[in-house]
C-alpha cells in the first residue's frame, strides 16, 4: 500500500511539473508577419536578395525582409502576438525581429523605419512579462528606438531633414494614462516617455521636444496623422537606394537596457517646447506650425 501511495504521489508530481515547467522553460521562436492588405504599388525585398517584387495579400514576411510603398500604396501587416502595423505610402520599412512564444506570450519584435510613416497597434502583454522585460515591441529609425507598451504608436521620419514625429495614442478602451511609448535618442543618449494622446518631435543631434497634446492639433492634421497618406516623403531617394542602414537587434537591446535604467532614475530634463523646430518637416510638420500646435492660437 505504501509503495502504491508513493508511486501515485510520484506520478502526481510528474503531472504537476509537466504542466508548470513549460511556461517557465518556454522559448521564443522566430516567426513571420502576414500581409493582410496591400493596395497600390507596394513591393517586398527578401533578405539577401537584390530584386524587389510585388507584395500581395497573404505574403509572409520574415526577419530581414523589407517593404516599400510608393505614392498611393499602403499595406497592413499582422504579427503573431496580435499586433498590427500599417505601412503608409512613400515608406520603406524593415522587419528586424519577430520572436514569439505563443504559450507564455513572451515576445521580442522590432521593425525599422528608414523613411515614411508607420502606425502600429501593439497588443497588451501580461504585467509579469513587462516587469521581466520579456515583452518588447520596438520601432526604430536611424535616430532612435521607440519602445511601445500595448498601445497605438505612429512614427514618421524623413531622412532628408533628419526629423521625425512620434505619436502615442491609447488603444480602444484603454485609459490614456496607461498608454505609453518610450523613446531613446541615440545622439543625446536620453529617454523621453510619451503617454497617451501626446506626441514629440525628434531632430538630428537634438533633444526631443517636450510632449505636446495630440488634441491641440487641428482636426485635418489629426486625420492626416492617423491615415495611410504620407505625401511628405514622396520621391525620397531612400525609397529606391540599393541599401539602407538598419538598427541592429544588439543596438535595440542596448537601448532597451538604457531605457530601463533611465526610467527608474530621475526623469530627464524635458526638451524644448514644440514649435519652429517642425517648420522643415514635410506636410505634417508644416501643418502643425501653420495650424498652431500650441493653443491659444490667433
Image: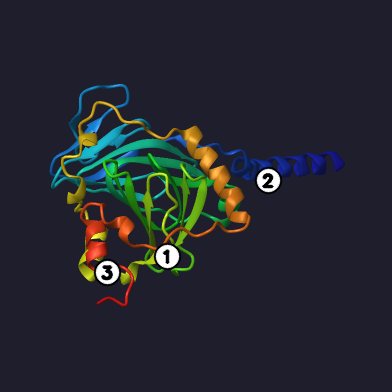
Circle 1 is placed at which residue position?
196
Structural crowding at the residue carrying mark 1, measured as other residues with C-alpha within 10 Å and reported as few (<14), some (14–19) or many (≥20)? many
Distance (Cα) linking label 2 and label 1: 42 Å
Image quarter of the C terminus: bottom left
Structural crowding at the residue carrying mark 2, measured as other residues with C-alpha within 10 Å and reported as few (<14), some (14–19) or many (≥20)? few
Circle 2 is placed at which residue position?
16
Q: Please indicate whether residue 82 sits to the left or right of residue 51 in the image.
A: right
Distance (Cα) linking label 2 and label 3: 62 Å
Q: Please indicate whether residue 235 sits to the left or right of residue 21 in the image.
A: left
Q: Position of residue 115 (x, y in %)?
A: 28, 42
- Figure quadrant of residue 279: bottom left
Circle 3 is placed at which residue position?
292
Label at residue 21: none
Which secondary structure lies at badge 2? helix
- Figure quadrant of residue 234: top left
Contact check, label 3 and label 1, Cβ < 8 Å: no
Given the current orientation, which residue lies at the most extreme right position? 2
Which residue is at the front of the view, 183 or 271?
Answer: 271
Q: Which of pointers 2 and 3 indicates the residue nearer the eye? A: 3
What residue sits 49% from the left and 35% below the top? 251
Which secondary structure lies at badge 1? loop
Contact check, label 2 and label 1, Cβ < 8 Å: no
Distance (Cα) linking label 3 and label 1: 20 Å
Amino acid at each position: 500500500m505504501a509503495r502504491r501511495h508513493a508511486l501515485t504521489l510520484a506520478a502526481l508530481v510528474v503531472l504537476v511539473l509537466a504542466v508548470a515547467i513549460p511556461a517557465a522553460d518556454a522559448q521564443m521562436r522566430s516567426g513571420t508577419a502576414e500581409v493582410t492588405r496591400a493596395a497600390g504599388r507596394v513591393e517586398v525585398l527578401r533578405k539577401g536578395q537584390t530584386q524587389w517584387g510585388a507584395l500581395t495579400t497573404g505574403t509572409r514576411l520574415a526577419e530581414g525582409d523589407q517593404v516599400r510603398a510608393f505614392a498611393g500604396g499602403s499595406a497592413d501587416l499582422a504579427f503573431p502576438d496580435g499586433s498590427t502595423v500599417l505601412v503608409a505610402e512613400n515608406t520603406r520599412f524593415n522587419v528586424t525581429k519577430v520572436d514569439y512564444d505563443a504559450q507564455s506570450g513572451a515576445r521580442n519584435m522590432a521593425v525599422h523605419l528608414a523613411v515614411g510613416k508607420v502606425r502600429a497597434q501593439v497588443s497588451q502583454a501580461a504585467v509579469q512579462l513587462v516587469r521581466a522585460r520579456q515583452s518588447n515591441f520596438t520601432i526604430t529609425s536611424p535616430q532612435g528606438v521607440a519602445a511601445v507598451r500595448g498601445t497605438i504608436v505612429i512614427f514618421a521620419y524623413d531622412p532628408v531633414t533628419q526629423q521625425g514625429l512620434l505619436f502615442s495614442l491609447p488603444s480602444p478602451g484603454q485609459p490614456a494614462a496607461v498608454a505609453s511609448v518610450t523613446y531613446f535618442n541615440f545622439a543625446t543618449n536620453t529617454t523621453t516617455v510619451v503617454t497617451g494622446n501626446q506626441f514629440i518631435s525628434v531632430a538630428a543631434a537634438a533633444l526631443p521636444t517636450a510632449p505636446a497634446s495630440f488634441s491641440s492639433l487641428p482636426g485635418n492634421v489629426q486625420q492626416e496623422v492617423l491615415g495611410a497618406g504620407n505625401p511628405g516623403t514622396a520621391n525620397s531617394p531612400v525609397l529606391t537606394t540599393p541599401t539602407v542602414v538598419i538598427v541592429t537587434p544588439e543596438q535595440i537591446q542596448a537601448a532597451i537596457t538604457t531605457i530601463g535604467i533611465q526610467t527608474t532614475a530621475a526623469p530627464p530634463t524635458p526638451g524644448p517646447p514644440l514649435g519652429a523646430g517642425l517648420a522643415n518637416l514635410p506636410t505634417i510638420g508644416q501643418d502643425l506650425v501653420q495650424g498652431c500646435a500650441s493653443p491659444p492660437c490667433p
